[in-house]
Amino acid sequence: MRKLTRSLSMRRTKQQPKQETDSESDGDLEDDKIMISKSPAKKPAPSNLNASKSKVKREPIGISSGVLSSIKSRPVSPITQTEKKCPIEGCDSSGHLSGNLDKHFLPEACPIYHNMSASECKERANERKLRNEQRLKMPVNIVTAPGNQNTNLKTLSPEQREFLAKIRESRANFKPANNNFLDSKVKLEKDVTDEDREPNLAGLVPDYDLQLFREAQAQASERIEDELKDLPVGKGIKYISMGKYKMKVWYQSPYPDDAARLPKMYICEFCLRYQKSETGIKRHAEKCVWRHPPGDEIYRKGKLQVWQVDGKRYKQYCQHLCLLAKFFLDHKTLYYDVEPFLFYIMTLADVDGCHIVGYFSKHIPFLQEKNSFYNVSCILTLPPYQRKGYGRLLIDFSYLLTRVEGKIGSPEKPLSDLGLISYRSYWKDVLLDYLCNRSGNTIAIKDVSQETAIYSYDIVSTLQALGMMKYWKGKHIVLKKQDVLDEYEERVKRRGTFPQDRRLLLKMAALHQYPAELISITTWLEACQGMLCRRRRR
């Protein structure tokens, strides 16, 4: 049975094998010839049972109907419910910080983590309940402010005034146990040497303020567990919430331990900062002033924009972007060393702001090695926007920049499964479009590579996958299969021309105010650096 695609099979971390081709050097491919031929005619499928068997055997690699039917016909075993347990060492998940529940499964609700026992948590819960009852019994006098009958002001009772005076006096007379506790370099003492314990907070603030913090902590622990009770059991992040989308992660990302142990994480869709709770992301959204990625907007068409972000100038944003991408990329290893890279982020705009669709990164041209031909270091389309054409547009934009620089490019290897499928589809359409519009009986792979900016080995591997390249009498022969070209032309008529947007180059030239034939990303960046140096000297 063939291997299923990523959408159905479990995603595991493994090294993608290097693709082998029967190609030789570019010098040996210059004298290649086009031979007009047709693919061998398909035999008529036999009837009845044999027909169905032959269809299953001849289906392309991917999710076949036979595989889908076999999956549907398999008996589904009942899912066993696993009891959730607290990850704190030495805790048996009994008790709850709020004192209202008998069990917990998060460190935020663990009594041992907060240096207490289950009985102490229940005692504090009873004390909080008594205080709340006393607050409700206190009379509240509402009087009308003089001169304004529409404004009601609350006045304090004598008991409340006396209590408020005591709090103010205690805060005024309070002296912290350590005078240097505000220094960020000072580490708080802990009751135990274990890292999975809350620091000792006594003596840092007045007792009344610490009591208010403990009450809020207990209420928050109950709400957080209520939000996460339906999520699956296991270590690591399972879901991320980003804007209006909730996405299931494919791999784990090296976020800090306090966030990585939660089953669900919240990410701001504009600045990409992470929060550990829904309340935290709501409070952050009210304060966040970002509505689009930093950097320069280098392309806009309708609601679609592309932003160029310098990894050195906006280091923190690019690090957050790489950590987000690791959730969906197996072979990604770069997270923090983002200075030598440029990031091109595609967004969709609406009344709320510019929402990130995907991105690709590449080395800054004048920092790249001389013999390097990579035009993409990492590329990703977020799951909510996959299978909508945005990935192909990102690939086309990367080759656009390569053509503007006057170079030939190829993505860094190894590619992910989805990345390989996307690139192979793009290369196939570019080459078929090139062959449909070319006349003559000879072709040189180098010429195709120069015109399309696609690396020659990618061209050869794509032609071999299409069955349009053969090795005959010591030479590589490109077979111009007319039925394949006719099928491609019919598909183009149904969906429109490819690439979908030939005006990208004109738009970029208009933005930079230079002719498209003369503009170069390298010289443009060097000119910008020269202008900055002259300004600093002034």
Image: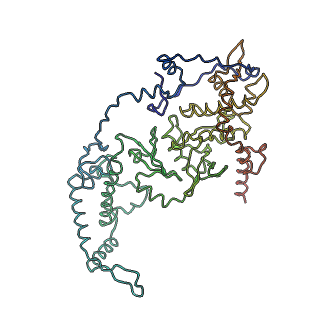
Q: Quadrant of residue 74?
A: top left
Front residue (pair 487, 159) = 487
* Residue 298 position (above or below residue 373): below
Quick check: 8 above or below 342?
A: above
Q: Nearer the viewer, residue 515 or 171?
A: 515
Question: On screen, 84 above or below 153?
Answer: above
Residue 94, horizontal then vertical, whole percent: 23, 47
- Percent across and percent down for residue 259 are 41, 47
Please identify the residue farthest to the bottom as the structure is shown. 147
For residue 129, above or below residue 390: below
Specify the quadrant that holds the C terminus.
bottom right
Quarter-of-image position of residue 443: top right
According to the image, what is the colour scheme of the structure? rainbow
327 left or right, relative to 96: right
Residue at position x 29%, y 38% in the image: 81
- Percent x, y for residue 213? 33, 61
Q: Position of residue 135 (x, y in %)?
A: 26, 70
- Count of residue discs: 0
